[in-house]
Image (cartoon, helix red, strand yellow):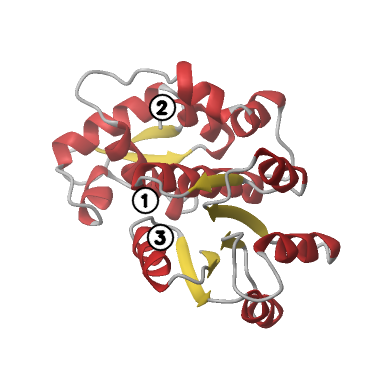
Amino acid sequence: MINVLIVEDDPMVARFNQRYLEEIKGFHLIGISNSIEDAMVKVNEYKIDLILLDVYMPGKHTGMDLLEQIRKEQRETDVILITAASEVDNIQSALRMGVVDYLIKPFEFERFKKALTSYRESNRMLQKQSTIDQSELDLLLLRDVQEAGNKAPLPKGLTSSTLSSIYDKIVSLEGQSFSTDDIADVTSISRVSIRKYLRFLKDIGVVDETLIYGIGRPVYQYRWNKLNSSRIQSYL
């Protein structure tokens, strides 16, 4: 799980961000800070992987001050700015200090979801492998370009949201073999639909398929092919 700290002084906005976060798998909310001082206490107390940070905060310190302090201390903490600060100078400063995304208030849930899911997938890819090749790195660095104009089409009848749900379950098995029924048991998706998605994942090499013979009819078993995992990114 990715540990998240929300730094936001407006209680209503903080609740919205919390509610949005709870709808996206793979994240755990450590807490909400309504001041930079409290945020720094939590950063020192807990292992924070990601901060959702507002720029304009009460008191003498701003969100940019917290970002700068985190970078000075070389903490392994990523930051997504969620703020009304739309000045170009502010955005450039934040990008130079390595924020992974920048959301300008007000924003839609879909943009929030894109920021968090992109971060989650990038984090997953980097955590699972000690080295990556150029094509995999391009998926991380050029994700926005790909999504804007080169998103690969799925076969008729398949959707990216359902594909993402099934793929998340497959990855959570961490290389263990599974059947269609295994995935159906942990999702609300029919076995017929799951077979279609597994067939597609097999065709692009993201899962390997094996026919197991035993008592009764043969059963197809699948296993996640981590080496080819980058191939799915253009479909999500």
Nearest to the observer: residue 1 or residue 12: 12
10 Å neighbourhood of mark 2: few (<14), some, or many (≥20)?
Answer: some
Q: Position of residue 221 (x, y in %)?
A: 33, 41
Q: Position of residue 128 (x, y in %)?
A: 62, 48
Q: Which label's residue is closer to the chain start, 1 or 2?
A: 1
Nearest to the observer: residue 215 or residue 110: 110
Nearest to the observer: residue 222 or residue 79: 79
Q: Is residue 114 visible?
A: yes
Residue identified by numbered label 3? 21
Residue identified by numbered label 1? 169
Q: Give the residue type that dot 2 points to.
A: Tyr
The residue tagged with tag 3: helix, strand or loop? helix
| Residue 207 lies in quadrant | top left
Q: Residue at x 54, y 29 (%)?
A: 144
Q: Residue at x 51, y 37 (%)?
A: 225
* Mark 3 → mark 2, Cα distance in angstroms: 23 Å
Q: Is residue 212 visible?
A: no
Residue identified by numbered label 2? 235
The quadrant the C terminus occupies is: top left
Q: Give the residue type that dot 3 points to.
A: Leu
